[in-house]
Image: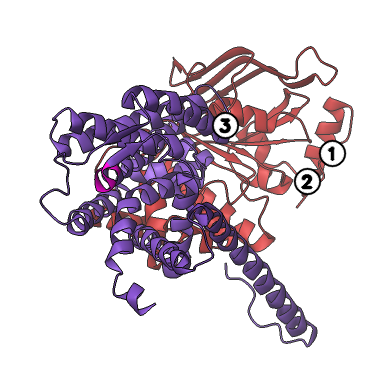
Amino acid sequence: MLKMNHVSKLFNPGTVDEKIALMGVNLHLKPGDFVTVIGSNGAGKSTLMNIISGVMKPDAGEVSIDGSSIGHLPEHRRSRWIGRVFQDPMAGTAPNMTIEENLAMAYRRGSSRGFQIGVTSSKRKLFKEELQRLGIGLENRLRAKVGMLSGGERQALSLLMATFTKPQILLLDEHTAALDPARAELITKLTNEIVSDLNLTTLMVTHNMEQAIRLGNRLIMMDKGRIILDVNEERKKDLTVEQLLGEFENISGHKLSDDRIMLG
Amino acid sequence: MINFLSNLDGPVELGLLYALMALGVYITFRILDFPDLTVDGSFTTGGAIAAVLITNGVNPWVSTLAAFGGGMLAGVCTGLLHTKGKINGLLSGIIMMIALYSINMRILGKPLISLSGEETLFSSIDAIWVMAVIVIAGKLLLDAFFRTDLGLSLRATGDNHRMIRSFGVNTDVTKILGLSLSNGLVALSGAVVAQHSSFADISSGIGMIVIGLASVIIGEAVLGNGSIFRTTLAVVLGSIIYRIVVAVAYEIDWLETSDLKLITAIIVIIALVVPTIRRSMKQRSMARKRSAELLTGNQGKGGAA
């Protein structure tokens, strides 16, 4: 489904601030894979996401979806295949527009936008059904401005907007990190439900080790721009947080450091 | 004063003439979040195109439409400078404003063209009625446009460009579209103002952006900014109220005509500063109230899920 071959990215090349963001990364995702990504600060997790979504262009290497190379396409042309939820709850929705208007924009993912009316009664019906799936009552607030919602509600809406058109690839970039534990748990639960219901090929960056082990069928660990550990479904089942941390120290030679890392 | 009140249709008529320009400024300033100074140039462009065509015997409706097209073209240029040339938005507008001065002079051929005795939009019907129809039609068309898929993506470009790009919208295109629509409306306003005053003048656009801003801000202060329908109505109303304020100012003996721009600037400053102060005062008193509540143990309700 998603293939990255020998992808590298440098920041500030040739200066004293040169930094390796990604170095020769190879990553192949099969259809329906749900891969969790962990790693320390500056390991290249966000760069990985940005290169797949087209926010950044790789310095070297190939990115392809479904066999066709997408490395040369700008972000807005790739969005046909890629749904994305950001860490910042403010990032995934338009605050001064209503819930139904936000959904109408997501509904048109990747297709051309012309003079058709954005929110029709048939679409409104569909949006209501989809919002009910979230179970937080947003279906009764279709005309509320998204800026009035709480962070958790906005993130739930972002998740729905990113997924309900069934993108080929779903990118989740620490999408529960900015939420308090209870709301983070709600979003995690919804993520799991939606990804398995729609059988979405998913890449999820998280700083929550327990979550990384519990969710998905594959886990990769990154350090200094490389993938240093790739855990398959079978091994992942019996993995504990302690084992994972030990494994990281063994391979990388230093402790996993992330000021926001959560162990459980 | 009584004499003035019985003469309200003057300011209303002017307000309607400039309302189109205010709607244009609203599109860039509020919807695209792009303070576009092209307006000062494109307003004159509109007047110049309409005046030249009319004096050459072209039908006034066709001439007015051509002015709209000319304004759109100016907006496209500003948009290209900003998106493709990666020039700061404010600077792109200033560059186009300056460039348009020369272009406007070329169109006019001389600093002023008189339209007296020419057939204009207002030759057979009272200006106030013609303008009421044009402004209401323009407002409703704009409302409808902002509810279409394309209109939604234009609004989202100003609201959260990162989000709308992740859903497949080329924000360069929506910005250029918004700027061209905005400057089209501004030029349209310039065209009707020229026909109303019976002349097109090279300096007619100076300070137009601030008048547009004043109208938008006054309108929002009076009617609030809820739905698009309500906000565009507020902008039209703001334009009319602005003209009433100006008319009142003219009644004051010691004020000179040239003080008008200063008065406009002061209106805009007040309208921009007061809401900020009010908001921070409200927030502070809210914070004080909540901390007092929390201290006394009356926790009340926090946030919801």
Q: Secondary structure at mark 3?
A: helix
Q: Which numbered dot is residue A257? A: 1
Q: Amino acid at mark 1?
A: Ser
For the residues labelled 1 and 3, the Cα–Cα distance comes to: 44 Å
Q: Are marks 2 and 1 in contact (CB under 8 Å)?
A: yes
Circle 1 residues within 10 Å: few <14, some 14–19, many ≥20: few
Asked whether the viewer can see residue A112, the reply is no
- The chain ID associated with circle 3 is B
User: From this viewpoint, which residue is outermost toward the front?
Assistant: B253
Residue A178 in the magenta stretch? The answer is no
Asked whether A3 or B270 is in front, the reply is: B270
State the hue of chain B. Answer: purple
Give, as a single range, the part of the protein colored magenta: B194-198
Circle 3 residues within 10 Å: few <14, some 14–19, many ≥20: some
Q: Secondary structure at mark 2?
A: loop
**Direction from residue B118 to residue A12 in the image, left or right:** right
For the residues labelled 2 and 3, the Cα–Cα distance comes to: 43 Å
Q: Where is mark 2, residue-wise?
A: A261
Residue A194 point in image, percent of width and height: 47, 48
In the rendered image, the vertical position of residue A107 relative to residue A133, given as above or below: above
Which chain is in red here? A
In which quarter of the view is residue B215 placed?
A: bottom left
Q: Amino acid at mark 2?
A: Ile
